[in-house]
Image (cartoon, rainbow, N blue to C red):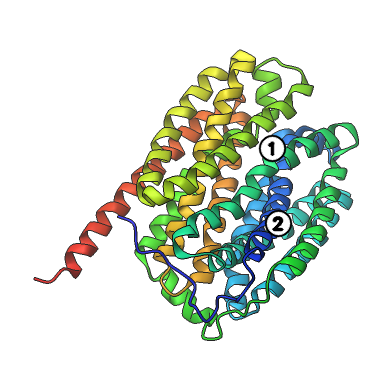
Amino acid sequence: MTSAPTTTPDDVRPEVPHARPVLAILALAVGGFTIGTTEFMTMGVLPEVAEGVDVSVPTAGHVISAYALGVVVGVPILAFFGAALPRRGMLVGLMGAYAAFNILSAAAPSYEVLTAARFLDGLPHGAYFGVASLVAASLVSPERRGRAVASVMLGLSVANVVGVPLATFLGQQVGWRATYLLGGLLALATAAMVLAAVPSMPGDPEASGRKEAREFFGSLQVWLTMAVGSVGFGGMFAVYSYIAKTVTVVGDLERGTVPFFVLALGLGMVAGTWLAGELAAWSVYRSLLLSSATGIVLMLVYFVAAPHGWVLMPVAFLVTATGSVLVVNLQLRLMDVAGGAVTLGAAMNHAALNIANALGAWLGGIVIAAGYGYRAPALVGAALATVGLAILLVSATVHRRQVAAAAPA
């Protein structure tokens, strides 16, 4: 079912010493750490944010959706204009913008300004991961492509083990504004590391935004793959967005236990991202099927476990582990089915995933506001994962028909 791997042409691959790819991929992964910390830390301090800008927790959840929508808007715009730009310079510029909008978030005087700042901060997100994935894949041999992309994504996962719990603790002790200031400082550090460690690498001189967009958006498999990410991954965000209230209100635990649950979610992401790189060598498509089906079961278990305090912790770990397997393999599949539109293909996965972020947080907020309680988003998550699995099966059917139509009579 999987397509042949998409690789970077030899004339784009830089000549670097043996040790340099490791340092370069590490710098790119630090960018993933920065983005992961900034994106997910809002969920850990959502009650503090709500209090700070004088809105309810479900309303404050729209700040998470605003960031996600910024990612969705930013990816096609930046990929359209950036395909031919030097890749290292583009990465540094994206991180500079990320730093500026985080600092604006920290200084926001009202809910409206904070929402706008989070939208703006989301704009560089997907383009960074897309370009970083292309750079990482170009620095290694084709058979190690999956592991290189997973390494970049691992930075995001490690953020949920180290960065997000620390940011949550910082927000509870010092104030939620300090968390966004931390995000800005991390972004500046990332820009410096990328500039120092990533080799100079030109963009594709033959690329044009219009040509890439026409090829990319003209593929049915592209649309199906993005739909899987946009809907199927929403379940994880439906539960993650409200983890703080689920732990304290449904699980009846102290507020100080929230960082430990956030840590469990992060450890699940690290484990799942590592596992995804291994499973990709087996089968990208079967890995997507396996993670989607497992996600449905885990969401139902999450719903049952939520009132039982610490029992929820291992379930939360498994939810994000399964979701991370889905994320990495969706990235690889979208790069494969994108054809020649590699810049757009590498970036658009993150637009799809952040549609899932917005959709999950929004639907979770709706069921909470309707009075169904803070564990109800898990049922929303199960439903979204079911739809994602159904779309994967449609993708398989389309693939078989395309193969049959291409076969000689």
Classed neighbour count for the residue bearing mark 2: other residues with Cα under 10 Å, few (<14), some (14–19), many (≥20): many
Residue found at the far left of this picture: 409
Residue of label 2: 31
| Picture layout, residue 409 above or below residue 386 | below
Does any portion of residue 233 appear in the rendered image?
no
| Picture layout, residue 168 above or below residue 178 | above
Which quadrant of the view contains residue 383? top left
Q: Secondary structure at mark 1?
A: helix
Q: Residue at x 30, y 55 (%)?
A: 1
| Residue 9 coordinates in the image, percent (x, y) | 48, 77
Q: Secondary structure at mark 2?
A: helix
Q: Which residue type carries mark 2?
A: Gly
Please give left or right for residue 327 compared with residue 371 in the image: left
Please give left or right for residue 41 compared with residue 127 in the image: right
Please give left or right for residue 403 compared with residue 300 in the image: left
Q: Quadrant of the C terminus?
A: bottom left
240 or 262, which lies in front?
262
| Residue 371 coordinates in the image, percent (x, y) | 60, 24
Does any portion of residue 221 appear in the rendered image?
yes
Residue of label 1: 161
Please give left or right for residue 363 compared with residue 336 in the image: right
Residue found at the far bottom of this picture: 206
Q: Which residue type carries mark 1?
A: Val
Classed neighbour count for the residue bearing mark 1: other residues with Cα under 10 Å, few (<14), some (14–19), many (≥20): many
| Residue 85 coordinates in the image, percent (x, y) | 64, 79
Q: Give the mark nearest the N terminus, 1 or 2.
A: 2
Which quadrant of the view contains residue 294? top left
Q: Residue at x 55, y 81 (%)?
A: 204
Q: Residue at x 59, y 67 (%)?
A: 135
285 or 365, which lies in front?
285
134 or 108, which lies in front?
134
| Residue 94 coordinates in the image, percent (x, y) | 72, 66
